[in-house]
Amino acid sequence: MDSLEQKDTEATAPSVIDRYYTRWYRADIKGKPCEDHCILQHSNRLCVITLAETHPILQNGRSIKSINYQISDGCSRLNNKVSGKSKRGGQFLTDFAPLCRITCTDETEYTIYSCIRGRLLEVNESILKTPSLLLKKPFTDGYIAVILPKFEESKSITENLLSREEFETIVSKRSVAEPQPT
């Protein structure tokens, strides 16, 4: 293969995320416009919770002041400890269980939700030390958490989620509805 063919192949090769994960979305979480979350579902049922490209945190050049996994006085997602093959001990989450709170430098606070039911396997402690990972690499190093749905629910968890095409339709309707600056 010559170098030109090799460059074409590299340019069109799908990313690891596109190759191994199915993207699902939850738009306007709890009725808050544009607070969209993305769920990357692997074929082994694991779901990685991230921010959708349209989330306000990833827009307008915002900076992150802090990320807090302490949900309430008695509940910190950092205290989640799982063990064994069946991942015993992980906190069980409902669809709208808060995972963390992110505060931007303009003091705007956003709560990130689980979006699916399942057992919390891990939270990304790397974004506590380096919050910019969330802005620069939201689908890889800047993920929020990893959740394992119950086996019997693994097919039905996507019923309340949007496919990529459905999500793009909603986003395009938003941009049409927004008034254009004159």
Image (cartoon, helix red, strand yellow):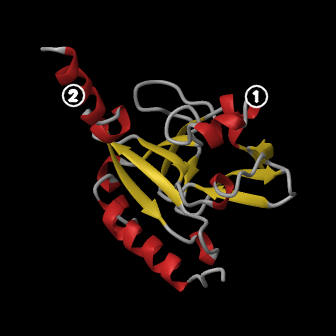
Q: Residue 38 appears at what percent x and percent y? A: 48, 54
Q: Residue 175 appears at what percent x and percent y? A: 51, 76
Res. 134 image quadrant: top right
Q: Residue 93 appears at what percent x and percent y? A: 56, 53
Res. 97 image quadrant: bottom right
Whether residues under marks 2 and 1 lie with C-beta atoms below 8 angstroms apart, the answer is: no
Residue at the extreme left of the image, as rendered: 1
Q: Which residue is mark 2?
A: 9
Judged by depth in the image, the label closer to the viewer, 2 or 1, is: 2
Name the N-terminal-most of marks 2 and 1.
2
Q: Is residue 160 visible?
A: no
Residue 129 shows which numbered tag?
1
Residue 76 shows which numbered tag?
none
Mark 2 belongs to which amino acid? Thr
158 over 18 or under it: above or below: below
Mark 1 belongs to which amino acid? Lys
Q: Give the residue drawn at x 58%, y 82%.
A: 178
